[in-house]
Amino acid sequence: MKNIFTKIATIAATSTALSVAIATGANNPAQAIDLNFNWLGNAGYSAVGSFSYDAATAPTIISESGSGATKFLQSLNVSFLDPSNNSLGTYNTVSGGVSQSDFFTFNFDTSTQKLFGPFDVGGGTGVIGEYFFQGTVGDSLVLRQDVNQQGTSTLVDQNSGSIHLAQVPEPASILGVLAFGMLGVGSTLKKKQASC
């Protein structure tokens, strides 16, 4: 019995140490926040993506636009899918704190965790046929495809401006859940062995 408690204590201590190391980012004091977003148009086309920023330096309102170095956004990518979930393209609009699109527009409230106002992500890098997703959150969001890089595009799908966000779980919290799961499995196995 004493051996079981020693093993459980060792597992718990190891899991706690790993969780703390990941949460504090041993060599990286940044507190990155990762969020996923998804959008569904009236005709069944969709956009799924994610973005990240450093919670330690970001203001309450993050507003970004245009190409070049961003102020607070670290990354933003988006993929577009047709109604059968076939990929139409994936775009890394912001990578390493640098926007790739002249048309990029992004507004996010860190306190409410909501996107708001003008929004334009996806294409914008000068390739004919690229997709882009734009409009005003809460009013109208549209998925369009460029025709000629001369300002002409075709409407692919749209909705009333609804877009959904979800925060990506932190690695430390995932490790904590796994640690408790391991403790439960270990305890169940020991009970079965004792009853045999």
Image (cartoon, rainbow, N blue to C red):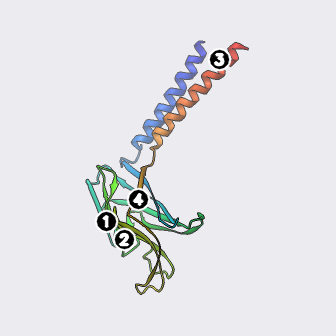
Assess whether mark 1 and mark 2 are in contact (beta carbons under 8 angstroms): yes
Q: Which mark is residue 64?
A: 1
Return the residue nearer the eye: 101 or 80.
80
For marks 2 and 1, give the CA distance.
8 Å
For marks 3 and 2, give the CA distance.
58 Å
Residue 2 position (above or below residue 167): above
Which secondary structure, mark 3? helix
Disc on the earlier residue, 4 or 3:
4
For marks 1 and 3, give the CA distance.
57 Å
Q: Residues within 10 Å of mark 2 (few under 14, many from 20)?
A: many
Question: Which amino acid is tagged 4?
Answer: Ile
Query: At 35% from the left edge and 71% from the top edge, which residue is drawn?
Result: 68
Q: Which mark is residue 191?
A: 3
Q: Which mark is residue 104?
A: 2
Q: Position of residue 136 (x, y in %)?
A: 33, 67
Assess whether mark 2 and mark 3 are in contact (beta carbons under 8 angstroms): no
